[in-house]
Image (tube, grey):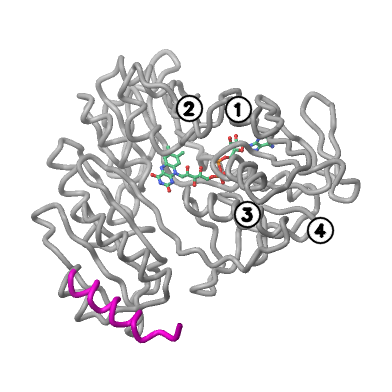
Amino acid sequence: MKNGIVIIGAGHGGVQAAASLREEGFDGRITLIGDEAELPYHKPPLSKTFIKDAAAKPQILRAEAFYSGAGIDLMLGENVVRLDPAAKRIEFASGSAIPFDRAILATGSRPREIAIEGGPLGGVLSLRSVADARVIRDLSATVEDVVVMGGGFIGLEIAATLVAGGRRVTVIEAQDRLLARALAPAIAAHVGERLAASGVRILTGTTVRSIEGESGHVSAVITSTGERIPARMLIVGVGVVPNAELAQAAGLATGNGIIVDSRMRTSAPDIFALGDAARYRHWATGDEVRLESVQNATDQAKLIARTIAGHGEDYAAVPWFWSDIGDMKLQMVGLTGGSDRTILSGEPADNKFSVFHYRGGRLLGIESVNRPADHMLGRKMMGLGFSPDPATAAAGGDALKAALSEWQARQPV
Ligand code: FAD
């Protein structure tokens, strides 16, 4: 492989792919390209801690010495604008081009943009990158009133972080409950109650009708019910769209992401895709999914490296995710869409409980609030393919561990 492997996108998945290729013994050329000027960094802290701490620095994924030490050509601040799968070449915005033998598309996703009546205005922001986080941090230090549009994970994390920093925060969510896309009603209700108790005003079943401004900067949000809410900052957190345009323009199969098979191979030979940008048929549910989590990007990167090294298997990692909202550590394992029965373990009043999701008696996943042991056990059980019966789930952690041990003892060696 004289031209080596190019990795487009230096986020969670791209950096892991570069590292895993070396761990798998690939000794050819690796070029890791990112359009951000920063050394690649962790995204999750941005909404949880970074925006409230003026002194916070981005948490880098790997030290600079890692890339040079591993012989990885790290090209930062470079935007790949064209991919030619037939000629096996990529082109940069600057006009230069490089050839490749294999390419990995790790381009991630970006916040969904929506046109709001009365806009565009300054102070209407979204959060994806550390550059966005700096803008939010700087502005939030000078304003009192913040409106967050969207009651999903990122919107609620930002709301909790900013209210803890003394801002007046209102969350406006179109659905009739928070976290409607992601979590069981019991957890969503709990999150809403605690956020409200911490001072966040939550309006569900409500949309932003328009915004008003002064001197080009947002000053108020008008809701669908006609209420006028003062706002010097409006954070739009209404989901993301995959960065699939490069692949689409190159003629690769796309549609809500870059379509990949069970080994993360795109429709073009020698081109892989992963992470937020990749859509695939999920091994457990059979549904077409595009998952947005660090785990998903990281595990897919490792699989691509194994596939290139010649010993890849079909993707079958158990999905998991976490979110920190105020004093709640939320941890999710499995895919719980389509559950027909839920079992509550623990007490919401203690701010420590889990919801086990079942379909037809089979465990689909577990959502936990401040119960990391349930989460870790869930990852273990689901990774092994063990589904405890609902009565055992209701009985708690010790019963689950005992049932798992018994089940393991019965498995053929
Ligand atoms: P990314 O990490 O987004 O990396 C993609 C990179 O590619 C970006 O730097 C992008 O700028 C670059 N790029 C795109 N196109 C090009 C191009 N043409 N040329 C060059 N470079 C390009 N997940 C969790 O599991 N738990 C959490 O608590 C959590 N919190 C989050 C909080 C925030 C604020 C955000 C934004 C995300 C959070 N996530 C969380 C999601 C998680 O960060 C993503 O799922 C993960 O980063 C996906 O990895 P990726 O490699 O697919 O994409």
Residue that badge 3 annotates: 257
Q: Nearer the viewer, residue 362 or 254?
A: 362
Q: Residue at x 71, y 56 (%)?
A: 309
State yes or no: discs 1 and 3 in contact (Cβ < 8 Å): no
Q: Nearer the viewer, residue 203 or 89?
A: 89
Mark 1 residue's CB less than 8 Å from ligand 1 = yes
Q: Amino acid at mark 4?
A: Pro
Residue that badge 1 annotates: 36
Badge 4 crowding class, 10 Å Cα cut-off, few under 14, some 14 to 19, many 20 or more, is some
Q: Quadrant of the C terminus?
A: bottom left
Residue that badge 2 annotates: 130
Mark 4 residue's CB less than 8 Å from ligand 1 = no
Question: Disc 3 to disc 4, how far (Cα)?
Answer: 18 Å
Q: Amino acid at mark 3?
A: Gly
Residue 113 lies, in percent from the top left, at: 52, 39
- Is residue 41 on the magenta stretch? no
Left or right of 11 on screen, residue 126: left
Question: Disc 1 to disc 4, how far (Cα)?
Answer: 28 Å
The kind of secondary structure element at disc 1 is loop
Magenta segment boundaries in residue numbering = 398-413
